[in-house]
Amino acid sequence: MKFVVKVSGKLLTPNEELLPRAVWELLAEGAQVVVVHGGGPQLSEVLQKMGKVPQFVDGLRVTPKEEMDVIEMVLSGLLNKMLVSAFLRLGIPACGISGRDAFFLRGERYVVEKNGQAIDLGRVGDVVQVDPRILHALWAHGFVPVVSPVCGDSEWQALNVNADWVAAHIARSLQAEYLVFFSDVPGVLRDPEDRDSLIATLTLVEMERLVAEGRIHGGMVPKLQALLRILRGRVREVFISEGSEVVHLPELCRGGRLSGTRIVLEGSEDGDVA
Ligand SMILES: Nc1ncnc2c1ncn2[C@@H]1O[C@H](COP(=O)(O)OP(=O)(O)OP(=O)(O)O)[C@@H](O)[C@H]1O
Ligand SMILES: [Mg+2]
């Protein structure tokens, strides 16, 4: 059973223990696990210290060419190694990689169109090709891949790809059974201001309606795009959950569910792939 676990930058702390422990339990159940991390707040903090003003279009971080180096240093250096250390400290053999390693994730620049006009987001990309050999090589030796979302372009130069998209492309390529997004919200909220307005089950059609109604903002936009545009129901179980739910991750192996938003296909009661 394959699990892709995406963890928000907001949940990454130097003393993280819950995620490595949960992954340890998944491994004990015989699962194959890939961890993907974001880095939203840390990137904004570093860029702000440098006098830059973070800008977003449809939840995507505008990435001027001259900021890409710093973004890569923070994601693939600081944050990736911080998370890897958290695993190693507990004796779990994690190995940090980015999309730029071992031909793993090749992307292209991604252009947003608004009112018929193309908006230049700089080095923002999306994945066009996944080469999963590095994952299988690491798994074969018992290592847990921990993925920074920096990808390579046709020349293997760095592209900044939203981490939710990276997780979705990996899950699709692996035909993973489970894709779980851990964020700082309980799941998809009907009203983003009201944490009690959780939508427990969401179909792709309802998701499209929520986006059209303008109930989805900021970083939730690319997260749902990952499900609508990239996955389109190709993964058996998808959850968007709060970080505290990490402790329940191993229960998925035993047929359990996570609190949060469970994504299902329209007309498919158990959410299985059509
Ligand atoms: N309808 C909604 N329901 C839930 N969250 C929403 C909604 N609309 C907007 N959001 C925002 O989306 C945010 C989650 O996306 P964000 O990109 O900030 O975090 P992430 O993707 O989990 O982490 P990272 O970007 O570090 O990988 C929430 O913190 C919330 O403010
Ligand atoms: Mg995000």
Image (spheres, rainbow, N blue to C red):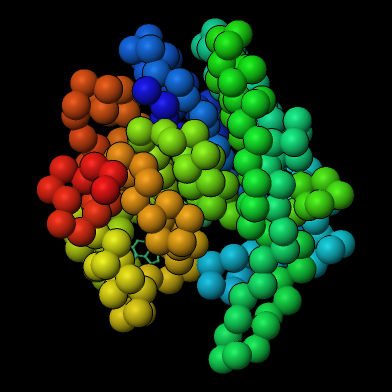
Residue 112 rendering spot, x and y as whole percentages: 62, 75
The residue depicted at 26 percent of the width and 48 percent of the height is 274
Q: Residue 198's image quarter?
A: bottom left
Determine whether 9 is above or below 25 in the image. below
Dividing the picture into quarters, in which one does residue 91 lie?
top right
Q: Place residue 100 in its image quadrant.
A: top right
* Residue 77 showing in the rendered view: no
Which quarter of the figure is the N terminus placed in?
A: top left
Residue drawn where x is 21% and y is 35% of the image: 257
| Residue extending farthest front | 274
Looking at the image, residue 47 lies above or below residue 183: below
**What residue is shown at x 67% (from left), y 66% (from top)?**
110
Q: At 30% across and 36% down in the image, what residue appears?
A: 245
Percent of width and height locating residue 80: 66, 33
Horizontal relation, residue 1 to residue 35: left or right: left
Q: Nearer the viewer, residue 109 or 19?
A: 109
For the residue pair 147 and 51, the one nearer the viewer reads as 147
Q: Residue 140: where, in percent of width, then height? A: 58, 11
Among all residues in the image, which is located at the extreme bottom? 115
Taking 29 as reference, is 130 above or below it?
below
Q: Position of residue 249 (x, y in %)?
A: 32, 28
Residue 59 seen in this snapshot:
yes
Count of numbered labels shown in the rendering: 0
